Image (cartoon, rainbow, N blue to C red):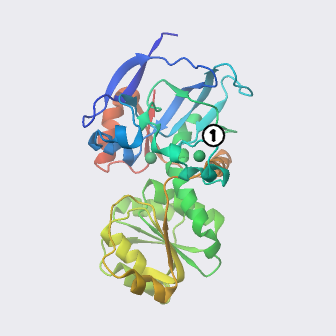
């Protein structure tokens, strides 16, 4: 083995990432090295060149760093003090970093741990490289049958989406309706989880015709064009005037927020997941109180969510559309993602 490896890295603030040659990391005490099989690209990777240098002071990000926070691979080597690992074991790496010792982690809400301000692929080295160094074995989840090349997207896109569905699944018994806004990567997973975990009718909303078709394939009962006029009215019509008992908004712009609130059924729940930075331009009291509705939001999912998702994937119960790119094609993959040319997830294979 040579002592250098390829890595797709942020070198300077406000500049695009570059393919670089760096030293293969050597695991120290407590650390584990993973040989990367594949790393899924995420919309958030596109924002990296636009992130202000203030992140260093605000969040503790350290430049330079390797991109990539959706990693599948194999256990390669570990430092003193690590026990119980098997060399060559196929694994997925939990995307959200957490400490395991704070009140949130204790409560199983590790996605809300303050350690997630810095993570693998954002502020420290991530998985678009030949190898990834872990600070400890906490994020390692062994795979039972799933190809680790395919595992990455389940750890972030798949996990975040799963967390959203777990927050509303109790309200989605027979006769209820779930509304999924945005049927891309995360929304596509949500449709599958809703199908597996609930008995609700699933209405999806999507502006892209190809993704609308895919949403129906994945199990949506109806998929409406997001560009249609009076979307909320159409949803009411489809639900005999009731509206949606749960709305998962994977877009989060002004229009989808307004539609979601207007389409909520009595006692309905709205979850804002998409980072569209939208605003609600109406008094909250009149928007929500008459329906006794609730609104919530979160970032990422928990370790337990990732375990559940990987268990479903290991059993072959989830469809995960991916397009593979070599590491030297990482810039091309980013371009395709930015241009909206991908139907599934781009996975960078070193
Ligand atoms: Zn992400
Ligand atoms: Zn914690």
Q: Residue 286: x and y, percent?
A: 40, 87
Residue 101 sits in which quadrant? top right
Q: Residue furthest left?
A: 15
| One can see residue 172 in this view | no
Residue 64 drawn at (x, y percent): 36, 28
Which residue does the image show at 35% across and 26% down from the upper left? 328
Label 1 residue SS? loop
Q: Which residue is mark 1?
A: 146
The foreground one among 350 and 68 is 68
Which residue does the image show at 54% across and 65% down from the upper left? 219
x 31%, y 32%: residue: 17
* Closer-to-camera residue (132/345): 132
Left or right: residue 280 compared with residue 102: left
Drawn side of residue 67 relative to residue 318, left or right = left
With respect to residue 75, does 303 lie above or below?
A: below
- Image quadrant in which you'd find residue 250: bottom left
Is 237 left or right of 314, judged from the image as shown? Answer: left
């Amino acid at each position: 083995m040579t002592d250098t490896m390829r890595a797709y890295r942020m070198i300077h603030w406000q500049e695009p990432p570059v393919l670089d040659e760096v030293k293969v990391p050597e695991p120290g005490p407590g650390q584990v090295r993973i040989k990367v099989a594949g790393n899924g690209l995420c919309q958030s990777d596109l924002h990296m060149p636009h992130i202000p240098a203030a992140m260093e002071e605000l969040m503790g990000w350290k430049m330079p760093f390797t991109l990539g926070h959706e990693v599948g691979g194999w256990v390669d080597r570990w430092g003193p003090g690590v026990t119980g690992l098997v060399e060559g074991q196929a694994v997925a790496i939990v995307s959200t970093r957490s400490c395991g010792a704070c009140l949130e982690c204790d409560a199983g809400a590790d996605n809300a741990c303050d350690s997630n301000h810095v993570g693998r692929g954002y502020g420290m080295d991530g998985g678009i490289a030949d190898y990834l160094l872990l600070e400890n074995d906490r994020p390692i989840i062994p795979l039972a049958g799933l190809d680790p090349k395919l595992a990455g997207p389940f750890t972030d896109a798949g996990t975040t989406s799963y967390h959203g569905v777990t927050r509303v699944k109790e309200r989605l018994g027979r006769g209820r309706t779930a509304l999924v806004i945005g049927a891309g990567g995360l929304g596509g997973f949500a449709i599958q989880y809703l199908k597996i975990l609930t008995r609700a009718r699933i209405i999806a909303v999507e502006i892209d015709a190809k993704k609308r078709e895919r949403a129906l394939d994945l199990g949506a009962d109806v998929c409406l064009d997001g560009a249609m006029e009076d979307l909320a009215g159409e949803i009411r019509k489809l639900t005999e005037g009731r509206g949606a008992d749960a709305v998962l908004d994977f877009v989060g712009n002004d229009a989808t927020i307004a539609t979601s609130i207007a389409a909520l059924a009595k006692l309905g729940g709205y979850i804002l997941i998409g980072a569209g930075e939208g605003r609600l331009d109406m008094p909250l009291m009149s928007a929500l109180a008459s329906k006794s509705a609730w609104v919530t939001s979160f970032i990422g999912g928990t370790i337990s969510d990732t375990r559940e998702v990987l268990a479903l994937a290991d059993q072959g119960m989830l469809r995960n559309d991916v397009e593979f790119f070599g590491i030297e094609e990482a810039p091309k993959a980013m371009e395709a993602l930015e241009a909206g040319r991908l139907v599934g997830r781009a996975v960078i294979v070193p």
